[in-house]
Image (tube, helix red, strand yellow):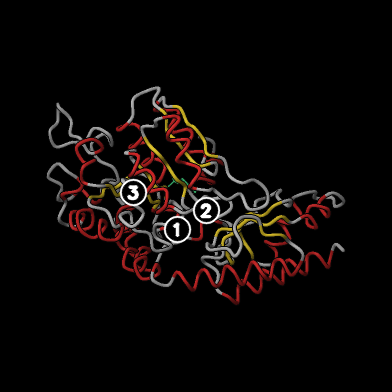
Amino acid sequence: MKEADIERLSSLSRPHGDMINIMPLQTGGMLTEAARRVLVDFGDGYSVCDFCQGRLVDIANPPVRRFVTEILPEFLGSESATLTYGARDGVFMVIHSITKPADVVVVDGNRHYSTAVAAERAGVELVVVPNSGYPEYTVDTEAFAGVIQEHNPALVLLTYPDGRYGNLPDAARLGKIAESMGVPYLVNGAYSVGRMPVQMNELHADFLVGSGHKSMASAGPSGVLGMKSKWEDVVLRRSALHKNKEVECLGCTLRGVTLATLMASFPHVVDRVAHWDEQVAKAQWFSTAMEAIGFKQLGEKPHRHDVMVFETTALFEISQRVRDRGYYLYKEMEARGIWGIKPGQTKALELSTFAATHEQLEQVIEAFKAILHKYR
Ligand SMILES: *Cc1c(COP(=O)(O)O)cnc(C)c1O
C-alpha cells in the first residue's frame, strides 16, 4: 500500500459533522444516543455471537430471540419476523423463495431499482402497473386487479412509500385485492417501517419489509422482514445438511454492530412512530414554504410523508450561467450548513424533512431564498 493511502484510510472522517441533514437516504438512519453507545462495545466482528448455540435468532444475550420472536412481530403487525441485511435483501429473500424462474411478479411503477434487480437475480419477470405520470406520479391500487387477472403472478409487490416522490398508495386496498385473488402480497416499507405506523395485518399483506439503516436509526446494512407464519416453512426453510441453518439467508444475517444498534435504537423508534402526525405536519409546512418561493412539489398533495421532490426550475436556470454549473447549489448549501443536496443536481431536488427541526427547516428555506437572491 502507498504511504498516502495508509494515511487516508487510517484517518477517515465524514465531511458534514453537525450540519442540517435533509438527505432522504440518511435522515431516518441517524443513530440514537443509545445506539452510539453500543457502537464500540459491539464493534468487533461476530460480537453478538458470544452465546450463540447455532441460531442467531435464538441468542438470549444480547436478547436477539426476544427481539426477533416477540418485539419485532408486534411492531410490524406480523405473525413472524426475521433479520435481513436491508430492504432489498428482504425483497430478494421473498421473491427467491416463493417464485420459480419465469414466474411473474406484479409491481407498482414507483418500485425501487433494487426490486427490479432482485427480480432479475431470481429470474422472474416484472409486470409494472404504471404511475399516473407528471406531476403527482400516484399509483392507483385499483388498477392491479386487471393486471393480476391477466398475468397470474406469483407475487404482488407495492412500494410504500416510494423513495422519490414519497407517495403513499392505498396499500390496504391492494391487500384486499391480492387476498381475494389468492396472490401473496409484499409491502416494501423501506421508507415507512420505523418512521410511520405500518402494520402488516392491517394492510392484508403476507410480507412487510423494512430497512434498519434507512428508517430505523441503525447502522447498516440491516433490515427486517415480517411475514405470516404460513410462509415460515418457505422463506425460513432449514438446510437439509445443517438442520440449524436457514437456506435463504445462508445460515444467519446480522452478526455484530448493525444488530446491536438496531436493538438499542428500537425503543426510540417505537416512540417516534407514535409521533408521525407531527412529521407529516412539518413536511406539509415545508412543502408550502417551498412553493411560496416558486418551487413545485411533485408527488401527492397534500403530502403525507417526509420524503419529497421539488421541481426547482429557477435553480436550474442559474446553473446554466454560472462557472460551477450544477455544482454551485451544493456548494452554496454546504456553505450555509445544509447537507443533502446531491452535487450537480439543480433541476429537481429530493429532500427529507424527517431529521431537521422546524427551525432548521426555516434555515433551509432562508438558504434557498438567499441563493435565489444572490444569483438573481
Ligand atoms: C432505499 C430503498 C430500498 C433499499 O433499501 P436497503 O435497506 O438499502 O436495501 C428499497 N426500496 C425502497 C423503496 C427504498 O427507498
Mark 2 to mark 1 CA distance (whole Å)? 8 Å
Numbered mark located on residue 29 in the image: 1
Tag 2 near tag 1, CB within 8 Å: yes
Q: Is 275 drawn above or below residue 238 in the view shown?
A: below
Q: Classify residue 2 as left or right of residue 49.
A: right
Q: Nearer the viewer, residue 364 or 31?
A: 364
Give neighbour class at mark 1: few <14, some 14-19, many 20+ (Cα, 10 Å).
many
Q: Nearer the viewer, residue 292 or 179?
A: 179
Residue at coordinates 43% horizontally, 35% vertically from top-left? Answer: 148
Numbered mark located on residue 276 in the image: none
Mark earlier in primary sequence (3, 1): 1
Say what secondary structure mark 1 lies in. loop
User: Ligand 1 near label 2 (Cβ, under 8 Å)?
Assistant: yes
Give neighbour class at mark 3: few <14, some 14-19, many 20+ (Cα, 10 Å).
many
Q: Is 222 drawn above or below residue 287 in the view shown?
A: above
Say what secondary structure mark 2 lies in. helix
Q: Which amino acid is tagged 2?
A: Leu
Q: Quadrant of the C terminus?
A: bottom right
Numbered mark located on residue 205 in the image: 3
Point out residue 305 in the picture as x, y percentages from the top left corner: 52, 62
Callout in the foreground (3, 2): 3
Q: Residue furthest bottom?
A: 359
Mark 3 to mark 2 CA distance (whole Å)? 25 Å
Determine which residue is flagged by label 2.
Answer: 25
Point out residue 193 in the picture as x, y percentages from the top left corner: 39, 57
Q: Which amino acid is tagged 1?
A: Gly
What is the count of numbered marks? 3
Mark 3 to mark 1 CA distance (whole Å)? 25 Å
Can the viewer see residue 222? no
